[in-house]
Image (spheres, grey):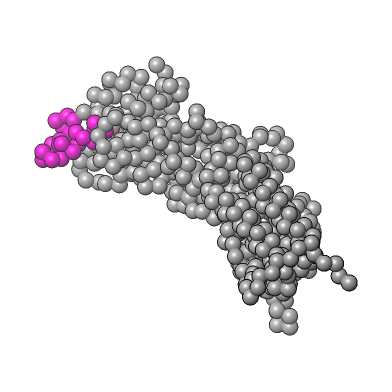
Amino acid sequence: MPQKPPFEIHPGNFSLDVSGVAGFFGGEEAISAMQTIHLYKGRKFLGWYNSPGSWNVGKKFGMLANSRFWDGLFPGPNEEPAKFFQLDGKQGPKYVASRSGSILEHTGHLAYLIMQTSKEELGVQVEGRVSKPNKVTIIQTQPVFKTVADSAVIEELPVREIPSQSGLHTYVALPPIAVSFTTCALCGWTYDWFCFSMILLGIVSSGISSVVIGSACLWLQGVKPAPTAPPGDGMLMDGDDIVLLLGKEEDVATITRGRFILEYAPWVRWRSRNERRKRSVLGDGIESTNSDHRSDAEAGLQDSSLDCDAKQGAVPTRDEYAAIGLCSLLLVIQLLGQLLLIPQGTFFGQIMFLSSFAASWVYNLYLSAIDKEYIQEQLLLKVLNLDEQHMQTYILGTRTAAAVFACLMLQPHGVAADKWKELGFKPESIIHNFIPNDTPVWVTWRKKILKVMRRRVRSQDTCRDLLTVRDEDVKGFNEDDKELLEKLLKDARIAYDLATKKQWLAGGMEK
């Protein structure tokens, strides 16, 4: 005879059916929590709890698996892991290079994070006229990648592993794990093997999925500059927010064109060599192609043995991520089991099942509330070796003051004006990107600014005299134009004083 449980709960006519919410409740929170798993140290080992939303999580992360079989089971776009986990894909602001003259209308995800960081800075308020404040952040870039003398290594794209950061999540994960194992044990103690098995299946499927999905390493991939590339000084422009990037081309290009990438181990990628054309249909009469659609950026971290095979004419391989597909399939099977078996459990077992769900949902809610972009910003600043002493933010009251300040900070130090063309430095273009106006007042103002830059010397007074209104400057101007020109030149004097002081303190100008 079956053993009698230690105690029983008699609900009377009340019937608790949790099968309807078993796999759908808390799905969005669970997905959001899983998307930060690579940003925190040890998170992948803390998923051993009965997490709700297994159906949503399985369908979402199953799209990472890349083959005809997995695409049929989990339809959707096959994005690269970094973009899938929202570590890539954001469109960055416009970039204007001060030396090469190149303009990027849109930069990448890293430039977007740098711009967001600068927007969050309080900044130093600069005295002067205020019409429309502009925030200008100066970033002195630091070496990111180690210099390697070996020419064979230099040809590869520079990459650097990003260490995950620590946090309170380690301790916050303990309660849901403890609740899940406790409720599972209580169900076994009362001989409710249906609810016991479903809670245990939830613990196992969530834990294994966390280990597999979270096993990727986060890398920073830079850009290999040309050997004769000029300094990478330039500016990111997003409305009234400006970021001046000063430093070597390699370090600046890492911000403007670099990216985050997620690299999984071979046992997770589980490459398939038999599938050549992804969308081929059996019996359609169309032969498979040998083209490899993987991007160059992600190919930078692929195994060298695979590249050798490709050169020898072997069938190109593709990351299938079959291990992630199997985990997603297990999560979907978990839902089916819960729909069938939970209603067969006792009233007490169902309460235990819901209790484990509730504790896990609260934990997922805590993880989903974390600002993912802020974590990425902190990791990026750390890997770029940037801190407060390398980043200074100023708030100037007008657009004209910001334009003059940026132009002066980007001006090559110790280089005569007749050498600017050889260096590719065009201050007119920089000012025009700020203020494209071509009215007589603005043309006069622009000429005076350029004259100051060409005759810039140690004495501030000499250049300040050039930033005053003279009779020959206002011929044909009415009173309103004269007043406007005086205001614009006053803004320029404030920007000149700030730039000169900043460069003296940084050692860029002689006293």
Type of secondary structure dominating the magenta stretch: helix
User: Residue 506, located in which quarter of the rendered image?
Assistant: top left
Q: Nearer the viewer, residue 50 or 278?
A: 50
What number of labels is visible?
0
User: Residue 375, located in which quarter of the rendered image?
Assistant: top right
Task: Measuring from the top left, give residue 117's x and y in whole percent.
Answer: 47, 41
Q: Nearer the viewer, residue 116 or 5?
A: 5
Task: Measuring from the top left, give residue 385's x and y in whole percent.
Answer: 58, 34
Residue at image location 71% in from the left, 39% down from the top:
151
Residue at image location 61% in from the left, 69% down from the top:
21
Q: Which residues are magenta?
A: 469-491
Q: Does residue 300 appear anywhere in the picture?
A: no
Q: Is residue 417 above or below residue 24?
A: above
Residue lying farthest to the right in this orientation: 1
Residue at image location 67% in from the left, 49% down from the top:
175
Residue lying farthest to the top in this orientation: 511
Task: Answer whether residue 57 is magenta in the image.
Answer: no
Task: Measuring from the top left, give residue 256's x and y in whole percent.
Answer: 52, 45
Task: Measuring from the top left, give residue 454's x and y in whole percent.
Answer: 34, 29
* Figure quadrant of the C terminus: top left
Q: Nearer the viewer, residue 397 or 295?
A: 397
* Figure quadrant of the N terminus: bottom right
In this picture, residue 465 sits left or right of residue 433: left
Task: Answer whether residue 476 is magenta in the image.
Answer: yes
Q: Does residue 147 appear anywhere in the picture?
A: yes
Residue at image location 86% in from the left, 70% down from the top:
2
Q: Is residue 108 above or below residue 422?
A: below
